[in-house]
Image (spheres, rainbow, N blue to C red):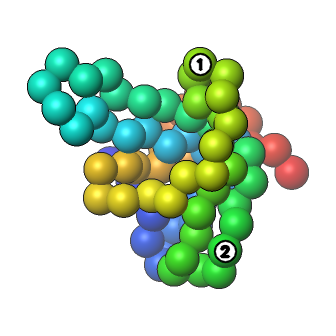
Amino acid sequence: MTTTTDTFRAAPGDLVVVEGHHVGEARRRGEILEVLGEPGREHYRVRWEDGRETLYYPGSDARIEPAQRAGRRRRS
C-alpha cells in the first residue's frame, strides 16, 4: 500500500482511496485534480466517482494510489 509520506508526493492523476468509517459503508475513490498546500500539509482538489469535486484533507483512513498503479496516466 502506498501512502502520502515525505518520500512520496501525490500528483494530479493519482487516486485517493478512502475506506468506509462504518460497517457497510462503501469505499470512496477519486482522482486528484490538483495538489494544494506545502509539503507535509498537502490537500487536494478531487473529482470523486460520482462526479462531485471537493477539497480533501487526507487522514489516516486514506491512501494514495499512483496513476501508473491505478491504470491511469499522470497529467502534466
Q: Which amino acid does label 2 sit on?
A: Gly
The answer to whether residue 24 is above or below residue 58 is: above
Where does residue 52 sit, x and y in percent of width and height?
Answer: 66, 28
Q: Is residue 21 left or right of residue 75?
A: left
Q: In this view, does 22 lie to the left or right of 6?
A: left
Q: What residue type is labelled 1?
A: Asp
Let me know if residue 68 appears in the view.
Answer: no
**Residue carrying label 1:** 50
Circle count: 2
| Residue 37 circle label | 2
Answer with mark 1 or mark 2, whichever residue precedes in sequence: 2
Q: Is residue 72 left or right of residue 19?
A: right
Which quarter of the figure has residue 27? Answer: top left
Disc 2: CA contacts within 10 A as few (<14), some (14-19) or many (>=20): few
Residue sitting at x 74%, y 54%: 34
Let me know if residue 58 appears in the view.
Answer: yes
Where does residue 24 sit, x and y in percent of width and height?
Answer: 18, 19
The answer to whether residue 38 is above or below residue 1 is: below
